[in-house]
Image (spheres, helix red, strand yellow):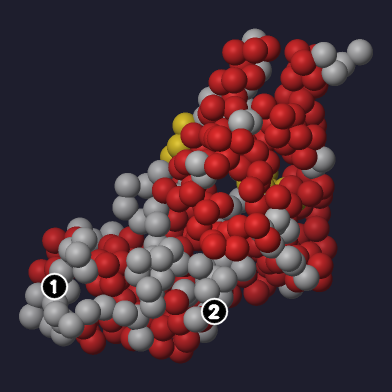
Amino acid sequence: NLHLGNYLGAVKRFVELQDANAMCIYCLVDLHAITNWQDPKELRQNTIEVTAAFLACGLRQENSIIFNQSQVPTHTELAWIFNCVTRMGWLNRMTQFKDKAGKDKENASSGLFIYPNLMAADILVYKATHVPVGNDQKQHLELTRDIAARINHHFGAVFTLPEPYIRKRGARIMSLQDPDKKMSKSDPNHNSYIGLTDQDSIIKKKIMKAVTDSQASVVSDSSRPGIRNLIDLYQLLSHDSIDAIERRYQHSSYKPFKEDLADLLINFLSPIREKFHAIRDDHTELTRIITSGNEYAQARAQTTLDRLKDKTGFAL
């Protein structure tokens, strides 16, 4: 279930990359999802719905491979090798685990602790050169490079060291209710995020309730994270410069700015929502797309894994 932050921080770049004739592979990460408890029916449905959302946002199956992580066992086989290569100290430095586990880390799953190794397998098994990530995942990509470099050092050239592909602005869309936190669909406050399939009235309601501050001036300032976040959204959707947005609303209160931002969002998301519902209803076609992607991904990943097995002494 994708939200606006997912789109602006990642999916929008996915579409741009395929338009640049890049060979793109997208993984529906249900194995990562189960680091927290998932209802099996919902997990299966979410895999289908994320595929529909990708297609509705502009991914084209003729340009992109979309596949289901759990159906390509090469990922988990490679991840086990990475578990034996990665040092505990490396994983202890991962801030995402600390943030997600919180004070109750003794009750966190071991999968949550080592999932960066699976993420590394997701990337390295396809010899990816670039990975579109948000700033919060940059540390994991650095770990991925460390793992690849260690294996290459001990066994010879096996893996490509991937580079992060991070948008300078808009890579991290913040919560509408707590702009110091990243926008997340797991937030219990549903007003904190905008889902890609939210109805028009819901979008407007959430924007009008978005946290700003008492200054009531539309100015992008790092000391004012609420209004800065909204201006970032406006800029990403309108493609106007930050200076132009500030000039447009320099004599306005927050209300007209928020109303215009809501209209921008509604005009932008309405076509995506309509396409999503049409695509999601064609379950047969979605299953065909995922199955085809699984077959391609497994064949390509197996070549890399076989090479590593030969280097490490697993192959007879």
Image quarter (top left, top right, bottom left or bottom right) of the C terminus? top right
Q: Residue at x 33, y 61 (%)?
A: 236
Question: In terms of secondary structure, where does tag 2 sit?
Answer: loop
Question: In terms of secondary structure, where does tag 1 sit?
Answer: helix
> Residue 158's quadrant in the figure?
top right
Query: Looking at the picture, how far across and down is residue 24, in whole percent?
Result: 59, 40
Amino acid type, label 1: Arg
Residue 28, can we see it? no
Q: Nearer the viewer, residue 119 or 2?
A: 119
Q: Residue at x 10, y 69 (%)?
A: 247
Query: Looking at the picture, how far across and down is residue 55, in whole percent?
Result: 62, 59
Above or below residue 206? Residue 222 is above
Give the residue furthest to the left.
Answer: 251
Q: Is residue 231 left or right of residue 23?
A: left
Q: Residue at x 62, y 68 (%)?
A: 1
The residue identified by callout 2 is 188
The residue identified by callout 1 is 248
Number of on-image labels: 2
Amino acid type, label 2: Pro
Above or below residue 69? Residue 197 is below
Residue 291, can we see it? yes
Above or below residue 188? Residue 229 is above
Give the residue furthest to the right.
Answer: 316
